[in-house]
Image: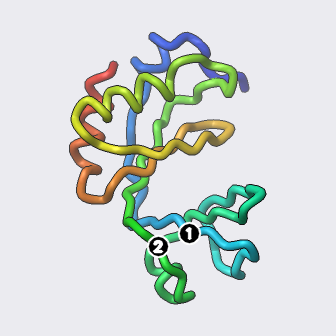
Amino acid sequence: MAGLTNLHEILGALRPSVRTGRFVVVSSPTPPDVDAQARIVEEEGTTLILTQDAADAAGLPYDAVFGWITLQVHSSLESVGITSAVSTALARVGISCNVLAGFYHDHLLVPVDDVDEAVDVLGGLS
């Protein structure tokens, strides 16, 4: 099933939802054997998105703790402007976000203390 490409339609259907848990980002030249929520392989090392509990149990260091927001709209990987619209709206209120694009949905990692405000901001984009 093809995702939406029209930015107006995408923003009207964002439906942000919060994934339960607290998440961290770690990097390692040799990825540890842990249950990762996401994995990105880069030349410098492998970046893992883990629950905070998994990182703590494995003794992995991290710099910040994030909430995970999933945009429930199925946007096309070829759509234009969604990352810009979302990150700009959050930046206007001082909320940082890191975007992960899945096949069906875009996912945002925002500081855990800013999750509720971020959902409110995103809900206002429709």
Q: Assign a secondary structure to mark 1.
A: strand
Of 38 and 1, the residue lying toward us? 38
* Amino acid carrying mark 1 in the image: Val
Question: In this picture, is 89 found above or below 112?
Answer: above
Image check: 14 left or right of 90?
Answer: right
Is disc 1 surrounded by few (<14), some (14 to 19) or many (20+) residues within 10 Å? Answer: some
Residue drawn at x 45%, y 65% is: 23
- In primary-sequence order, the first of circles 2 and 1 is 1
- Location of mark 1 (residue): 26
Quarter location, residue 3: top right
Q: How many marks?
A: 2
Quadrant position of the C terminus in the picture: top left
Question: In this picture, is 55 found above or below 92?
Answer: below
Q: Assign a secondary structure to mark 2.
A: loop
* Amino acid carrying mark 2 in the image: Tyr
Question: In this picture, is 38 found above or below 96?
Answer: below
Question: Residue 63's x, y, as percent?
Answer: 42, 69
Quadrant position of the N terminus in the picture: top right
Residue drawn at x 47%, y 46% is: 98
Of 76 and 65, the residue lying toward us? 65
Question: Residue 72's x, y, as percent?
Answer: 48, 36
- Location of mark 2 (residue): 62
Distance in Å between CA atoms under marks 2 and 1: 6 Å
Residue drawn at x 54%, y 82% is: 60
Report the residue that reaches farthest toward the front. 44
Question: In this picture, is 27 found above or below 124?
Answer: below
Q: Are marks 2 and 1 in contact (CB under 8 Å)?
A: yes
Image check: 5 left or right of 124?
Answer: right
Question: Residue 65's x, y, as percent?
Answer: 37, 65
Report the disc number at residue 61.
none
